[in-house]
Image (tube, rainbow, N blue to C red):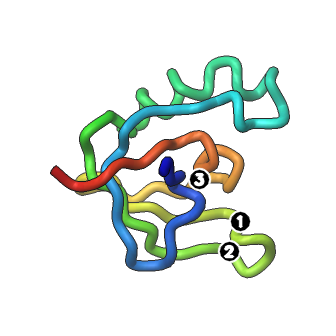
Amino acid sequence: MTKYLSELEIGETGVIAGFDTTRIDDQEFAADLEDRLLEIGFEEGLEAELLHVGPIGRDPLAVKVGTMTVALRKMEADAIKLGDKA
């Protein structure tokens, strides 16, 4: 079963397994989302940990990827597929 970054609970981790931008309603925004995520360090195989979620609709999210902490919109996290740790 595929799990997405936006579905993690605070403190939970997962390994980035890829991207699925078809889950994004705004396809114009999603067109280059994978490239933008790769540019800021969301690479396959890295561990991601959910640190914090916003109080309204779990948006935005604070995520630790490798050694960096990044704030993402929930719709961006909806496109990041997670796998199990090796």
Q: Is residue 26 above or below residue 47?
A: above
SS category of the residue bearing label 1? strand
Mark 3: give few (<14), some (14-19) or many (20+) Cα within 10 Å.
Answer: some
Q: How far apart are marks 2 and 1 (CA)?
A: 5 Å
Q: Relative to 45, is 21 on the left or the right? A: right
Q: Which residue lies furthest to the left in this view?
A: 86
* Label annotation for residue 59: 1
Q: What residue type is labelled 3?
A: Leu
Is 8 displayed left or right of 84 in the figure?
Answer: right
Q: Name the residue under label 3.
A: 72
Q: Distance between the residues labelled 3 and 1?
A: 8 Å
Task: Describe the element under mark 3 as helix, strand or loop.
Answer: strand
- Lower position in the chain sequence, tag 2 or tag 3: 2
Image marks 3 and 1: residues in contact by CB distance under 8 Å: no
Q: Which mark is residue 42?
A: none
Q: Could you say where residue 1 lies in the image, as x and y percent from the top left?
A: 48, 51
Task: For mark 2, give the secondary structure.
Answer: strand
